[in-house]
Image (cartoon, rainbow, N blue to C red):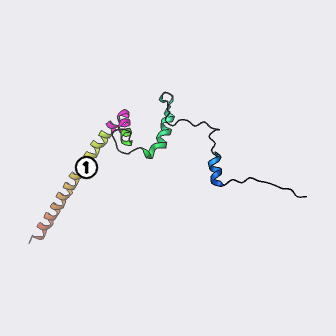
Amino acid sequence: MNVNINRQVFNKSQFENTIDTQFKELKPIQDPTFFDLSLATIEDFFTLYSTFFFEIPKEGETNSHNYLIRESTEYTNFISNQEEIDALLAEIEDLRKENTELRNEQAKLIEDFSSALNNQP
C-alpha cells in the first residue's frame, strides 16, 4: 500500500516576510518615551543610573558624573571635610620644604666643619 504525503515548503525569506515570528502579542510593549516621574522610586533611579552609567558624560554643567558629584558633595557637606584635608596637605607640603631646608643647612654645616678640620695645621 502506498501512502502519498504532501508537504508545503516555504522559501525562508518568504516565510520571514509572511509570518511574524516575534512574540509581540504575548507581552505588551510599553512606549519607551513614557515615564511617570510621580511613580518613580529611589530604586528606579539607581537602576537607571546603573543602566546608563557609561553613557553619562564624565564632564558637564548638568547631566554628567561631575554634576552628580558636585550636587552630592554639597548636600553631604563633604566639602568641609575636603577643605580640612586640603589644609592638612598644604601643611605637610610646608613641613617637607622646611625639612629639606634644614637638611641642606645641616649638610652645609657638616661640610664647613669638615673643611675647617682639614685646613688646621
Residue, far right: 1
Classify residue 91 as left or right of residue 59.
left
Toward the viewer: 67 or 8? 8
Q: Position of residue 79 (x, y in %)?
A: 33, 37
Q: Position of residue 2 (x, y in %)?
A: 88, 58
Classify residue 77 as left or right of residue 105.
right
Q: Position of residue 97 (x, y in %)?
A: 22, 52
Q: Is residue 77 magenta?
A: yes
Name the residue located 44 percent from the left edge and 47 percent from the top edge. Answer: 54
Residue at mark 1: 93
Q: Is residue 74 magenta?
A: yes
Residue, far left: 121
Q: Position of residue 49 (x, y in %)?
A: 46, 40
Toward the viewer: 85 or 118? 85
Count the marks: how many?
1
Q: Main secondary structure of the magenta part?
A: helix
Mark 1 neighbour density, 10 Å: few (under 14) some (14–19) many (20 or more): few
The magenta span reads 70-81
Residue, far top: 38
